[in-house]
């Protein structure tokens, strides 16, 4: 099993930056990839980006590329989502996810952290 705990959400103004953290514990030796997703009220879950567990290769939603950056601190088993130039439409619950070696999809999820961007 893998446990994920997000933190760092909050209320910010448009144009601000915010960094979310995802602390990973449990069977980390089985993790292939980490991802960030978000879900706005009344909307479906949206892929934000992902990164290999080694932290070397990342990919992003085309609409967010350039503003959002994913990284991993290998010394702390923590994955980060740096969000810059935030917009009101970025308001969502942000979720961290992990893909275990036994799955072809992200199969471990955190509880989510709320990000609210005011105009």
Image (tube, rainbow, N blue to C red):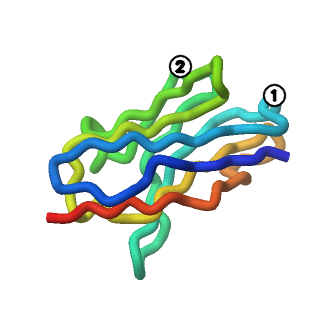
Measured as percent of width and height from the top left, residue 103 is found at 77, 47
Residue 72: which quarter of the image?
Answer: top right
Give the residue displayed 68% in from the left and 47% down from the top: 4
Marks 1 & 2, CB-CB < 8 Å contact: no
Measured as percent of width and height from the top left, residue 116 is found at 32, 63
Give the residue displayed 76% in from the left and 41% down from the top: 100
Category of crowding for the residue at label 1, using alpha-carbon neighbours closer than 10 angstroms: few (below 14), some (14–19), many (at least 20): few
Give the vertical position of 91 relative to 72 (above or below): below
Category of crowding for the residue at label 2, using alpha-carbon neighbours closer than 10 angstroms: few (below 14), some (14–19), many (at least 20): few
In the picture, measured across the screen, residue 102 lies left or right of residue 108, that is right
Secondary structure of residue under mark 1: helix
Give the residue displayed 78% in from the left and 32% down from the top: 28
Secondary structure of residue under mark 2: loop
What is the C-alpha distance between the residues marked 1 and 2?
A: 16 Å
Give the camera-side residue of 42 and 80: 80
Give the vertical position of 86 relative to 75 (above or below): below
Measured as percent of width and height from the top left, residue 42 is found at 41, 81
Comes first in the chain, label 1 or label 2: 1
* Residue at image mark 1: 29
Give the camera-side residue of 16 and 64: 16
Give the residue displayed 72% in from the left and 53% down from the top: 107
On residue 56, the disc is 2
């Amino acid at each position: 099993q893998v446990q994920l705990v997000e933190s760092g959400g909050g209320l910010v103004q448009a144009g601000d930056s915010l960094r979310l953290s995802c602390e990973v514990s449990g069977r980390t030796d089985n993790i292939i990839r980490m991802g960030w997703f978000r879900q706005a009220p009344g909307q479906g879950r949206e892929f934000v980006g992902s990164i290999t567990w080694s932290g070397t290769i990342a990919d992003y939603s085309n609409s967010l590329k350039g503003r959002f950056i994913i990284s991993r601190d290998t010394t702390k088993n923590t994955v980060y989502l740096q969000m810059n130039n935030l917009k009101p439409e970025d308001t969502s619950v942000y979720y961290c996810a992990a893909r275990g070696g036994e799955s072809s999809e992200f199969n471990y999820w955190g509880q989510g952290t709320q990000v609210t961007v005011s105009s």
